[in-house]
């Protein structure tokens, strides 16, 4: 890949990224609308126009705010149809209104300060990866909002690769399918996705650190426990009252603390209480369990059921109802049957001059759902760091490199 193309990728990716992050697409878990926020429509409409300008065919912004497009293969290029997917929304965790990106050129390796005020925004101790980008350009928010690199970086990288295919026809590619999904941060990114618009397999551009490829995510369950107690005037309650709220609290206290998010990392799983409420007669506990190994999660589920029975025996009259719902599965169950999909991506990352980093995702991804809907979809880095926070940042070089990875990846599929 020559210098001219690299410069094109860098400039395009930066310009697009800085433009897209200014549109507030924060999703809203309290909304009943689809998508959950108006801003996603604004970005969706803009991307639809830009895809049409790039000569992409079958461009569509559908009634649920999914953006689709299709790019025919380069003439004579034989290869499978590939999907590239990113999400329109940003996390509800922090405001996405009036994002003002700050561009720090020639980063000096020091803590990052809020422009103007001099207040420390982000230290190298909080985000040691900063030190890997000394001399590079860092883009960060001004500390009032998140940056929105998750996932505007992914969108900018896909759009940049498409514009490179248009500007440099010598960059050859198979048939491409593009999809931008709404409300991914609410876990709804694939709820209304139309699978006939997908390719044979795909890649989500939604990962973190430059060089990363992710083929594994949590096996995820949500549990709801309802404690039915027996209430009576507390002055006359001896041997009669069964306090639902108090027994629920003891129940939560009996979960192993060492298997909590606060005490686990890497491949370790956990129990995590997300909500508790109640009174003497009725209490509810919501919790999630996570692991890479579904057998480990079955063990956790069994423990909770046994604990519930034990509590019922211990407190005569107490009834505990346990309901479990699978949220998403570990995509590795699918991806390990299609090793080429990630292997070609790794070759593209290496060919782009960066080291491959392989990590399991301690969370979920749109790709996990797509895998189980029949489209094997690992996750590739965007370069976004400290996502879902006011200190979210991205090195500009990652925007360029992720775009380059997409371009190279497409070329490599033709030589299979
Ligand atoms: Zn994301």
Image (cartoon, rainbow, N blue to C red):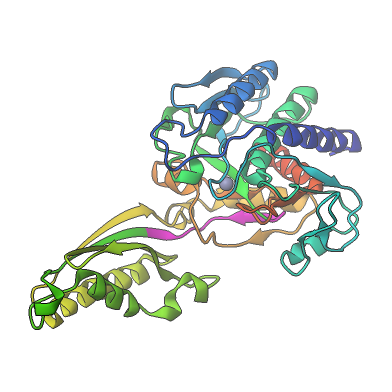
* Residue bounds of the magenta highlight: 209-220
- Residue most toward the front? 235
Q: Is residue 369 above or below residue 354?
A: above
Res 201 visible: yes
**Quarter-of-image position of residue 102:** top right
Q: Is residue 98 above or below residue 368?
A: above
Does residue 171 appear left or right of residue 366 in this picture?
Answer: right
| Residue in the foreground of this view, choosing between 9 and 49 | 49
Residue at 23%, 65% (x, y): give it.
Answer: 279
Estimate the x, y position of residue 73 in percent, counting from the top left. 63, 25
Which quarter of the image is occupied by the C terminus? top right
Count of numbered marks: 0
Does residue 292 appear left or right of residue 238 in this picture?
Answer: right
Residue at 84%, 53% (x, y): give it.
Answer: 117
Q: Does the magenta stretch include residue 170?
A: no
Residue at 44%, 38% (x, y): give it.
Answer: 190
């Amino acid at each position: 890949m020559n210098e001219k193309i690299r410069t094109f990728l860098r400039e395009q990716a930066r310009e697009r990224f800085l433009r897209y992050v200014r549109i507030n697409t924060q999703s809203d878990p309290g909304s009943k609308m689809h998508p959950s926020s108006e801003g996603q429509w604004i970005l969706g409409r803009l991307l639809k126009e830009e895809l049409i300008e790039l000569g992409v065919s079958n461009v569509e912004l559908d009634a649920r705010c999914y953006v689709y497009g299709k790019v025919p293969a380069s003439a004579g290029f034989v290869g499978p149809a590939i999907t590239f997917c990113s999400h329109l929304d940003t996390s509800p965790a922090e405001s996405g209104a009036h994002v003002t990106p700050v561009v720090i050129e020639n980063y000096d390796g020091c803590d990052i300060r809020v422009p103007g005020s001099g207040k420390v925004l982000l230290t190298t101790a909080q985000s040691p990866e900063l030190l890997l980008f000394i001399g590079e350009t860092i883009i960060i928010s001004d500390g009032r909002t998140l940056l929105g690199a998750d996932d505007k970086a992914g969108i900018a990288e896909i759009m940049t690769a498409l514009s490179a295919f248009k500007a440099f026809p010598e960059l050859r590619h198979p048939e491409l399918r593009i999809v931008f999904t709404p409300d991914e941060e609410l876990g709804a990114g694939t709820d209304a996705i139309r699978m006939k618009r997908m390719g044979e397999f795909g890649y989500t551009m939604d990962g973190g650190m430059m060089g990363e490829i992710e083929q594994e995510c949590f096996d995820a369950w949500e549990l709801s426990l309802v404690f039915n107690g027996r209430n009576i005037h507390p002055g006359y309650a001896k041997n009669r009252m069964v306090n639902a709220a108090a027994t629920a609290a003891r129940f939560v206290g009996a979960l192993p603390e060492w298997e909590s998010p606060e005490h686990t990392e890497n491949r370790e799983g956990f129990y995590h209480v997300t909500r508790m409420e109640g009174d003497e007669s009725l209490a509810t506990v919501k919790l999630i369990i996570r692991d890479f190994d579904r057998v480990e999660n079955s063990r956790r589920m069994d423990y909770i059921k046994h604990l519930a029975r034990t509590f019922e025996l211990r407190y005569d009259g107490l009834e505990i109802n346990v309901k479990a719902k699978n949220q998403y599965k570990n995509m590795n169950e699918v991806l390990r049957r299609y090793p080429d999909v990630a292997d070609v991506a790794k070759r593209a990352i290496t060919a782009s001059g960066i080291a491959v980093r392989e990590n399991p995702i301690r969370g979920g991804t749109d790709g996990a759902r797509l895998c189980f809907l029949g489209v094997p979809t690992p996750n590739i880095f965007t370069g976004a760091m400290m996502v879902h926070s006011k200190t979210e940042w991205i090195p500009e070089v990652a925007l360029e490199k992720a775009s380059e990875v997409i371009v190279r990846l497409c070329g490599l599929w033709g030589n299979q």
